[in-house]
């Protein structure tokens, strides 16, 4: 699948931008959106030229309002059809070892909050808001919220959001560590692309194995985490990029060094 009805898929150099394109439904995810997200993220994962992925929503109101509850009421959201993927796209995937960034351009509620947590980094417009609002409708979290929120925020802060359903603004989200940066409204995608370009300019093998070790070791014992780190390091240290990095270091061929006069 190369053309989507509910998504925009753009390659901007080495950065892929995936936009949920249902602004008339606050970028809610229905069954077709789910399938398109699965396809799009698989496409990104397997594209050797795509180094960093950015996820955002169309318009300036919503990043993603979560699941399409109208579709759910009509029985169209097949919650058991793809248990290895997730309910709202490939939210249960943990093996995309490329950096991902959420550009949160508006509200991120329920499944939308879960998708913001799925990414490695998050940049939010200052008018963005976050909440487990599905709490009001007796709908549980099924796309990683109970697991990723607790890992990102710690148990008490995460459970506060999970069991109260309260909505927080972007500045509180930054204060508690839910997002990395808050930027003026309308600029989160620009800032996310700047970050993505900076990351894409770095040597990739060790970056990816460090990312794999950090993700895989999360929640495990220190002993297990150190073993995972060692295994990942052993793969990247022999990459050709490492030899080139050593050459550049020893010859002072460093991108941050100003040319001598």
Image (cartoon, rainbow, N blue to C red):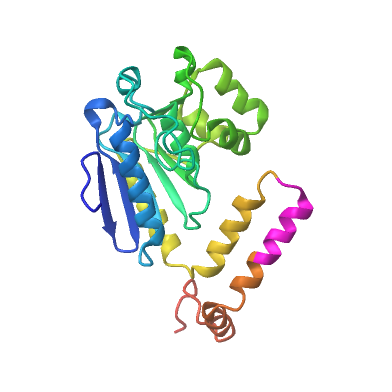
Whole-percent x, y for residue 255 in the image: 46, 74
Query: Where residue 107 sits in the image (x, y, percent)?
Result: 37, 28
Q: Residue at x 56, y 22 (%)?
A: 162
| 231 up-or-down from 33: above or below | below
188 in relation to 242, above or below: above
Residue 80 in the image: state x and y as whole percent: 45, 31
Is residue 191 shown in magenta? Answer: no
Q: Where is 114 relative to 227, above or below? A: above
- The spot of residue 69 in percent (x, y) is 34, 20
Q: Residue furthest right?
A: 223
* Residue sitting nearer the eye, 45 or 11: 45
- Residue plotted at (38% across, 53% down): 42
Span colored in magenta: 220-231
Question: Does the magenta segment cover residue 221?
Answer: yes
One can see residue 119 in this view: yes
State the count of labels: 0
Q: Is residue 191 visible?
A: no
Residue under the image location 24 percent in, 33 percent down? 22
Q: Residue furthest front?
A: 81
Would you say 191 lies left or right of 162 here? Answer: left
Q: Predominant secondary structure in magenta?
A: helix
Quarter of the image where one finds residue 130: top left
At 68% across and 61% down in the image, what residue appears?
229
Q: Where, quadrant-wise, is the C terminus in this rendering?
A: bottom left
State the residue in front, 17 or 73: 73
């Amino acid at each position: 699948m190369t053309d989507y009805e509910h998504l925009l898929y753009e390659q901007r150099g080495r950065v892929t931008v995936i936009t949920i394109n249902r602004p008339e439904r606050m970028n809610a995810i229905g069954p077709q959106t789910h399938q398109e997200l699965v396809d799009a993220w698989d496409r990104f994962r397997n594209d050797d030229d795509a180094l960093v992925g950015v996820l955002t929503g169309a318009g300036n109101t919503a990043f993603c309002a979560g699941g399409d509850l109208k579709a759910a009421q009509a029985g169209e959201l097949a919650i058991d059809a793809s248990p290895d993927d997730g309910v709202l796209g490939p939210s249960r995937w943990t093996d995309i070892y490329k950096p991902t960034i959420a550009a949160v351009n508006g509200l991120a509620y329920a499944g939308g909050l879960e998708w913001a947590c799925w990414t490695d980094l998050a940049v939010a417009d200052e008018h963005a808001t976050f909440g487990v609002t599905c709490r009001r409708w007796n709908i549980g979290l099924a796309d990683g919220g109970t697991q990723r929120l607790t890992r990102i925020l710690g148990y008490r802060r995460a459970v506060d959001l999970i069991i109260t359903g309260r909505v927080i603004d972007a500045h509180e989200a930054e204060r508690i560590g839910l997002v990395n940066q808050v930027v003026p409204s309308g600029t989160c995608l620009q800032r996310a692309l700047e970050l993505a370009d900076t990351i894409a300019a770095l040597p990739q093998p060790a970056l990816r194995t460090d990312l794999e070790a950090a993700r895989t070791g999360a929640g495990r014992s220190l002993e297990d985490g150190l073993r995972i780190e060692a295994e990942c390091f052993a793969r990247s240290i022999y990459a050709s990029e490492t030899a080139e990095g050593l050459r550049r270091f020893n010859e002072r061929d460093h991108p941050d060094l100003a040319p001598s006069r």
